[in-house]
Image: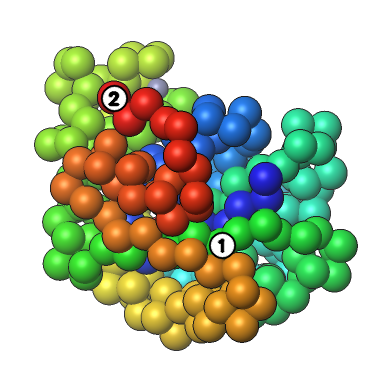
Amino acid sequence: MKLIILGEPGAGKGTQAEILSQKFNIPTISTGEIIRNAIRQGTALGNEAKQYIDRGLLVPDSVVIDIIKDRLHEDDCKNGFILDGFPRTVPQADALTKMGITIDKVLSLEVPEEKIIQRISGRRQCNECGATYHVIYKPPKQENKCDVCGGELIMRKDDAPETVKNRLRVYHEQTEPLKDYYKNKDLLVVAYGQEEVKDTTKEVFKALGVEDYDYN
Ligand code: ADP
Ligand code: ZN
């Protein structure tokens, strides 16, 4: 299964991608996570990307396309993968085709914009290992401390309200056209985000035509 998940920042793509990943036993590839790791490690790529990501702008196509090319060649992608956050522009989508990759389905995860803002403002991430939390929906056991490694939980710089506005604008301008792009290829399915993660998962599986899932 080769799947793309589209959706506004904060729509919950990462959460659903993780669940699908376990169900199908294929990796989730998040360009955002790859870039944030590079920034944490202070690599050349990280330093270049930081100036874009912190302002809520897209990292240049050539940079992310190179990242994805390398990642998709790794062994664990042989049986499929879930792309979370790639492609985000038409040239990126064209690049996938040029790599000879046939996508099975493109899932658009739709969430009303007021929900998005509310969700993003509560998001926290471990400064050390990158594990993600939400102050209301997925709180850590100890306030501000990572359950996995004990690291400090911080707000992503690009989750600041002014930057989120930029990211939403960028999404509408550059990423949303991909819905039509994939609709025209007959690959698009839509799921509507719900209050509870497991209810959203139910919608996601329905949209993908997967029946046998224990949602609890
Ligand atoms: P979200 O979906 O919540 O915006 P991501 O982690 O997917 O979060 O992306 C965060 C940031 O990483 C984006 O705003 C952008 O700067 C950069 N980024 C991630 N994926 C891409 C991509 N495919 N093309 C360009 N920039 C990207
Ligand atoms: Zn951690």
**Residue 113 figure quarter:** bottom left
- Position of 95 relative to 64 (above/below): below
Image coordinates of residue 39 in percent, x first then y, are: 55, 45
Which residue position holds label 2? 216
Numbered label tally? 2
Quadrant of the frame with the N terminus:
top right
Which residue position holds label 1? 106
Image coordinates of residue 146 in percent, x first then y, are: 31, 21
Mark 1: secondary structure: strand
Q: Nearer the viewer, mark 2 or mark 1?
A: 2
Give whichever of 82, 120 is nearer the camera: 82
Outermost residue, front side = 211
Q: Is residue 143 among the parts visible in the rendering? A: yes
Image coordinates of residue 72 in percent, x first then y, are: 77, 46
Q: Quadrant of ligand 2?
A: top left
Quadrant of the frame with the C terminus:
top left
Instruction: Give the CA separation, mark 2 to mark 1.
Output: 25 Å
Q: In the image, 157: left or right of 37?
A: left
| Other-residue count near label 1 (Cα within 10 Å), few / some / many at <14 / 14–19 / ≥20 | many
**Does label 2 or label 1 sit earlier along the sequence?**
1
**Type of amino acid under label 1:** Val
**Residue 76 figure quarter:** top right
Could you tell me which residue is drawn at 35 percent across and 34 percent down? 132
Q: In the image, 119: left or right of 43?
A: left
Mark 2: secondary structure: loop
Disc 2, ligand 2: is the CB inside 8 Å? no
| Other-residue count near label 2 (Cα within 10 Å), few / some / many at <14 / 14–19 / ≥20 | few
**Type of amino acid under label 2:** Asn
Image coordinates of residue 133 in percent, x first then y, are: 28, 33
